[in-house]
Amino acid sequence: MLITYLTRELRRRARQAIFIAFGLALGVGLVITVTAASKGVSAAQSTVLQSLYGVGTDITVTQSPTAGSGTGTHFGFGVPDRSGSSVSRNVLASAGLGTMKSSAVTTVAGQKDVSAAVGTLVLNDVTFSGTFSSSSSGGSAGTRGSGTSGNFSANSFTVTGVDPSNDTLGPLSSGTITSGHSLTAAEADQNVAVVYSNYAKSQNLKTGSKISVAGTSFTVVGIVQASQGVSEADVYIPLARAQALAGMPDEVNTIYVSAASAADISTVSSEISKVLPTATVSTSSDLASDVTGSLSNASTLANTLGKWLAVAVLAA
């Protein structure tokens, strides 16, 4: 009886029934879509934050650059004696960071709640090449023309010097070697390199290939794939070789620190700030907060939209 009544009413009000069914279907579809988007944002947030916290480094220590620090190998073009002269110069310089003595690594490692510390030297390898052309302004004999110009090009890539004796901490610790092997303690003074996979692909490099760093030939011994959320250099070489080529003996510009436990991170940060008062101390939570805000806002927006959309559908 009830089914007969419902069928009859649906036939009598076919237009209203179709309209309501379409509206309900649209509302349910929107709820499902927004809910799925909300879950996706939450999953993305968890993945990103896990990668930020899971790189084996609790704290990083850097130094703000000062005049004359971290400039590495100095070079100058000079002005050639005749127009059309070709020049090529290479510089290996600290990548916008001030330098610290390697003894700072020992100082940090000696703090009570520190389990390990390792220093690295982050550099930029830049090669300038081109041709000078000079124009004379009719000055007195023996004076150079007033104008100097030319066509120049610059090629650069990032280089990080790492300590091969401590591969459990630092930029290479979270990466995955996809070909060859990582740097070893026996290679601390050798011209060998591990190359980031994307850079290797762009430059057609593989294990056994040669790559020039500061004008010195290095042999690629490994290809590394960095973990998600971890900044990577194009090329990794032994720290001692990076210091020698950059003209920065016994210097580092980034220290990676592992605390004895997660509960000690805040304490370790305070300890390092006391022994290195001019250094910038960043914890893993500081790094994570850079992305947490935007991800949390997106997740909250999706959840709120889904809630009110569900209420609207129920009201309809």
Image (spheres, grey):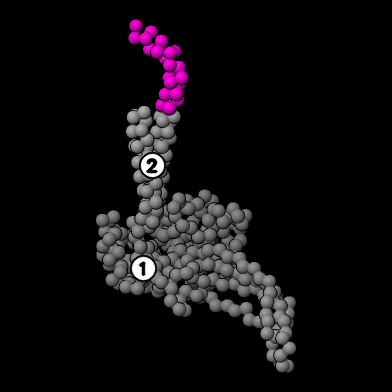
Q: Amino acid at mark 1?
A: Thr
Q: Reading the chain from its start, which is encountered first: label 2 or label 1? A: 1
- Residue at disc 2, secondary structure: helix
Q: Within 10 Å of the Cα at label 2, are there few (<14), some (14-19), or many (20+) other Cα atoms?
A: many
Residue 113 visible? The answer is no
Q: Amino acid at mark 2?
A: Ala
Residue 83 figure quarter: bottom right
Q: Is residue 168 toward the left or the right of residue 259 in the image?
A: right
Residue 275's place in the image compared with 38, above or below, is below
In the picture, the disc for residue 84 is none
Please give the residue where the numbered disc 2 appears in the rendered image: 302
Residue 247's place in the image compared with 310, above or below, is below
Residue 15 in the magenta stretch? The answer is yes
Q: Which residues are magenta?
A: 1-24
Residue at coordinates 56% horizontally, 72% vertically from top-left?
Answer: 91
Task: From the viewer's side, name the closer residue of 171 and 312.
Answer: 312
Residue 133, image x and y in percent? 71, 78
Q: Within 10 Å of the Cα at label 1, are there few (<14), some (14-19), or many (20+) other Cα atoms?
A: some
Task: From the viewer's side, name the closer residue of 299 and 52.
Answer: 299
Residue at coordinates 44% horizontally, 59% vertically from top-left?
Answer: 171
- The C terminus lies in which quarter of the figure? top left
